[in-house]
Image: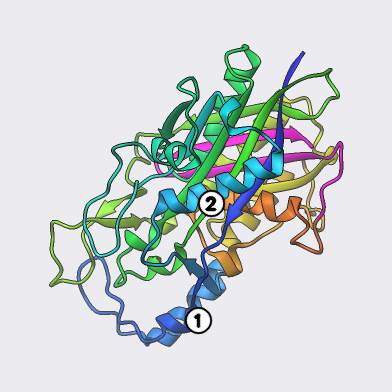
Amino acid sequence: MLHSVITGSGSYIPPFVKTNQDFARHVFYTATGTALHTEPGEVVSKFKKITGIEERRYTTNDLNASDLGLEAGRLAIRDSGTDPETLDQLIVAHNFGNVIKDTIQTAAVPSLASLIKNALGIRNPNCVAYDILFGCPGWLQGLIQSDAYIKVGLAKRTLIIGTEALSRVIDMYDGDSMIFSDGAGAVVLEQEEGNLSSRGIMGYVAQSYSMDEIDYINMGPSFYPESDPRVRYLKMKGRKVYEFAITQVPAAMKLCLEKSAVPIHELKKIFIHQANEKMDEAIIRRLYQLYEIDTTPVNIMPMSISWLGNSSVATVPTLFDLVRKKQFPQHELHPGDIILFASIGAGMNINAVCYRY
């Protein structure tokens, strides 16, 4: 029986720290172009209570999304001990390509995966490099796609990277801009022979809700009335996203556990997209309530959002890498632990993966 096993991980956390207090001097506007009458300091205080975010990381001016992904990928390759020339696929999840500082266009040709393959010096033409655009769940979708290739024998070893520089596409006049950040995470996934109790991916769920939900996360003009209307920024209908997420994500997670034949009490860790602390906590409560369990287990869900913010496709692989490498004192992974990855994002797309560590 073929299994898809994570043999290495890596992450890149940008050095520049942007704190909530840095936003306390901002003037925020509404979607109608009206300046908020609430004091910026009060806006920032309420933001912290709602999201749990205290600071976030931005990349330096000289680095783009592909550069961040390169560093995370290089660390994952080194961690796995893999010869990069033996990779069958190099998959990069992102949503905006490379947005060079102080420009208004994205560069996605050639693909970020091709740029990273070039920078890694991989000459093997049979290492296929391509990008995935799937909203925030893109990295996890790359993991799912790699698992499918491995289990049908079309690949033996893949590198999956999630990278984003959201600081280049946010509207600083929109309070939601405080949510987003930059970063990258990666894993090497390899084929191993095993049995039903062996380590590796056990099952997954992937869903797209693209009717009424299509514009919950979108691109739109700045809230500042005198801005260039031709320039588009990342926009979000926060309440709509929250209501959708706390209903649909727990259901998808439960379905994933069922497809993997895993009872909820055997679950040791949940690595969920770091979108909003209160929303993530509500999702986990709802998941356990679906099993008629009122109390969420202590330390079931590591969280990095308070200091890393929401870096889209990078949140889940970065969080996994940090826990795997013992960067969270209260969280550990042990051989045989069953863990659940889950994410939600623009589309609206949802996915979940059950994995035996």
Q: Secondary structure at mark 1?
A: helix
Measured as percent of width and height from the top left, residue 329 is found at: 81, 64
Of marks 2 and 1, which one's residue comes earlier in the chain?
Answer: 1
Q: Is residue 207 toward the left or the right of residue 342 in the image? A: left
Residue 290 visible in rendering: no
Tell me the amino acid under the disc marked 2. Answer: Glu
The residue closer to the viewer here, 197 or 300, is 197
Q: Which residues are magenta?
A: 332-357
The residue closer to the viewer here, 11 or 210, is 11
Residue marked by disc 2: 71
Q: Nearer the viewer, mark 2 or mark 1?
A: 2
Q: Is residue 22 toward the left or the right of residue 78 in the image? A: left
Verify whether residue 337 appears in magenta: yes
Verify whether residue 318 appears in magenta: no
The quadrant holding residue 130 is top left
Residue at the (29%, 72%) spot, across then down: 173
Tell me the tag on residue 45. 1
Tell me the amino acid under the disc marked 1. Answer: Ser
Measured as percent of width and height from the top left, residue 85 is found at: 57, 28
Q: Main secondary structure of the magenta part?
A: strand
The residue closer to the viewer here, 255 or 110, is 110
The quadrant holding residue 247 is top right
Q: Is residue 171 toward the left or the right of residue 75 in the image? A: left
Residue 198 against residue 57 in the figure, above or below:
above
Q: Badge 1: few (under 14), some or many (20 or more) residues near its Cα, within 10 Å?
A: some
Residue 260 against residue 277 in the figure, above or below:
above
Give the spatial CA distance, label 2 vs label 1: 34 Å
Q: Secondary structure at mark 2?
A: helix
